[in-house]
Image: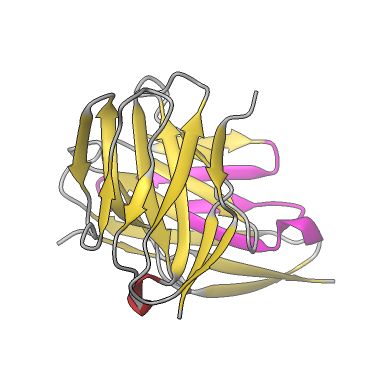
Amino acid sequence: GQNIDQPTEMTATEGAIVQINCTYQTSGFNGLFWYQQHAGEAPTFLSYNVLDGLEEKGRFSSFLSRSKGYSYLLLKELQMKDSASYLCAVMDSNYQLIWGAGTKLIIKP
Amino acid sequence: NAGVTQTPKFRILKIGQSMTLQCAQDMNHNYMYWYRQDPGMGLKLIYYSVGAGITDKGEVPNGYNVSRSTTEDFPLRLELAAPSQTSVYFCASSDRDNYGYTFGSGTRLTVV
């Protein structure tokens, strides 16, 4: 079966760095996405990785290792507004997105 | 640019009632999707469409129906509402060229 695993909840301090991991097992691979979802709102696109390596976009970076079925989202200089759920999703061989349950990130002052 | 528009935002249904969740996008995207999101769970695909006149079942289609008569609109129909359909429903669209999904703001449905 297809499976995306990520931690349920993480806590970090304002100004610090946090890494959210995602491991996956899917039928085929056409890219990995990270989305941010604030409580009661729709997911919004953060990043897309299809090749191995690190993609940096401002305070957020995303890493992919296809051989290990592994990705992480790195958030630097954490701000209170970064409190949200972070969803990992993999596009399979049929170009369908398979979603993880999300990681709820709690930022403390 | 409105993006993806979903209506209504909230709805309470009684068991056995029916309703249609509306979804419209103005980005000329061919691909459209309906998801449900239950607390603590990932997004589950209900139905999707790769273009006008073409629809297909996702992971959890039972109890739902869709149609895609135009590129812009992709309504989701619940015929006989059941408590198990209490959830938040998201419509999304995408352009195959850039893969990123644009989501509507969601419909919070409660069946009592």
Instruction: Check residue A52 for magenta coloring.
Output: no
For the point 63% across and 62% down, the residue is: A40
Q: Position of residue B58 (x, y in %)?
A: 22, 50
In the image, farthest residue toward the front: B17
Classify residue A23 by image quadrant: bottom left
Can residue A44 be seen here? The reply is no
Image quarter where the C terminus of chain B lies is bottom left
**Residue sitting at x 39%, y 30%:** B99
> Do we see residue B107 in this rendering?
yes
Classify residue A27 as left or right of residue B5: left
Residue B93, how many percent across, how many down? Answer: 43, 34
Query: Compared to A33, does A107 lie above or below?
Result: below
From which residue to which does the magenta span run? Answer: A58-87
Q: Position of residue B44 (x, y in %)?
A: 33, 58
Total numbered labels: 0
Q: Residue at x 29, y 60 (%)?
A: B79
Q: Is residue B68 left or right of residue B103?
A: left
Please determine whether, in this image, residue B110 is positioned above or below residue A4.
below
